[in-house]
Amino acid sequence: MEQPLRRVLFVDIDGVLHRGDSYAVGGRIVSSAPGRIELFEYVPTLDGLLRCYPDVEVVLSSDWTFRFGVDFALNMLPDSILRQRTTGATYQGCDSELQWPRLSRGAQVRDYVRRHSLNRWLAVDDRKDGFERDRDRLIHCQTEVGLGDPAVFAVLRSRLRERFGEPST
């Protein structure tokens, strides 16, 4: 059954919410760019946009959720609109969770879209593999810049307006 009113923003973590990648050391996640970035540095940037779209939910499309679990990923996020709006992750409910990591990012997102019969969605990601059919739905970040790139931020703002309507004040 189609869910026309549901509006979903798929959000990756590494290369989007902060510059660069990250990795696990002991029980901690650290930046792959030592000394130059703070994890989740762009959460306030995304929060600012999401404030204007109160009905948009977030689904994480990050390897973090598969590797460490959704609860872990959510607990790592600073207290934010992003954290409050996150309703799950793309791999949850996948027909074969073991196959999920082998899928392109676009295929992971499209699988979720198909399973939930979505027609109003966007994805913000530093990976563009598998989004060839959905280029107009992908806001592509450069891994080393993330949402800190003013041009990418402008595209995200514009696409939110195109897909989800005028922002509320």
Image: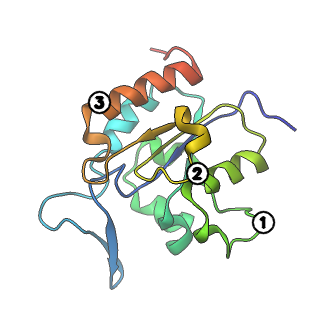
Q: Answer with left or right where residue 7 lies relative to residue 148.
A: right
Q: Are marks 2 and 1 in contact (CB under 8 Å)?
A: no
Q: Earlier in the sequence, mark 2 or mark 1?
A: 1
Return the x and y of residue 55 as percentages of the image width and height: 60, 29
Residue at 76% x, 28% y is 4
Identified by mark 3, the residue type is: Ala
Q: Where is mark 3, residue-wise?
A: 151
Residue 6 marker? none
Q: Secondary structure at mark 2?
A: helix
Identified by mark 1, the residue type is: Asp
Identified by mark 2, the residue type is: Gly
| Residue 42 occupies quadrant | top left
Residue at 50% x, 19% y is 161
Distance (Cα) linking label 2 and label 3: 22 Å
Q: Secondary structure at mark 1?
A: loop
Q: Where is mark 2, residue-wise?
A: 106
On screen, 134 above or below 55?
below
Q: How many marks?
A: 3
In this view, which residue lies farthest toward the front? Answer: 132
